[in-house]
């Protein structure tokens, strides 16, 4: 019997450098520990959006800064959650299940999240 093998294209996760970021259907943006540390562990963030490319940005902010969203600790851990439902609705970012941003990077202090590169979590 002939097999049509398909190589798995994502290598093993590098826990030291992987920027794990997910978005749930109720708008909870989970920023993994590595990404949170690289943003300098902010108490709040501002949310940015590039309409042309449909890319989200997350930039550290002072908790009292205008338009800032607090980063909340959920359970005990080093990751943080930002409630982004209003932002997502405003920009037409709709997900029916939790998704992961495959190509999350930090550029000039901004966590860049491409909504075109979201993948469903099983």
Image (cartoon, rainbow, N blue to C red):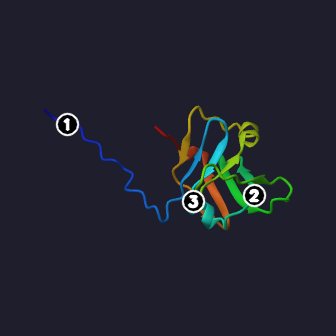
Could you tell which of marks 1 and 3 lies nearer the N-terminus? 1
Near mark 3 (Cα within 10 A), the count class, few <14, some 14-19 or many ≥20, is many
CB within 8 Å, label 1 to label 2: no
The local secondary structure at tag 1 comes to: loop
At which x and y percent is residue 14?
Answer: 43, 61
At which x and y percent is residue 54?
Answer: 66, 46
Q: Which residue is mark 1?
A: 3
Q: Which residue is mark 2?
A: 44
Could you tell which of marks 2 and 3 lies nearer the N-terminus? 3
Drawn side of residue 109 relative to residue 116, left or right: right
Residues 46 and 54: in front is 46
Drawn side of residue 10 relative to residue 39, left or right: left
What's the residue at 71%, 45% (across, down)? 83
Measure the alpha-carbon separation of dots 2 and 3: 15 Å
Measure the alpha-carbon separation of dots 1 and 3: 40 Å
Q: Quadrant of residue 78?
A: bottom right
């Amino acid at each position: 019997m002939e097999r049509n093998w398909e190589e798995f294209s994502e290598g093993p996760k590098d826990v030291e450098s992987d920027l794990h970021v997910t978005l749930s259907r109720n708008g909870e943006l989970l920023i993994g520990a590595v990404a949170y540390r690289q943003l300098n562990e902010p108490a709040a963030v501002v949310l940015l959006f590039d309409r042309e490319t449909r890319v989200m940005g997350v930039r550290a902010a002072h908790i009292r800064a205008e338009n800032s969203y607090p980063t909340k600790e959920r359970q005990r851990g080093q990751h943080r959650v930002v409630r982004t439902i209003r932002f997502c609705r405003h920009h037409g970012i709709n997900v029916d299940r939790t998704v992961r941003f495959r190509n999350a990077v930090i550029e000039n202090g901004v966590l860049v999240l491409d909504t075109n590169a979201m993948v469903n979590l099983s």
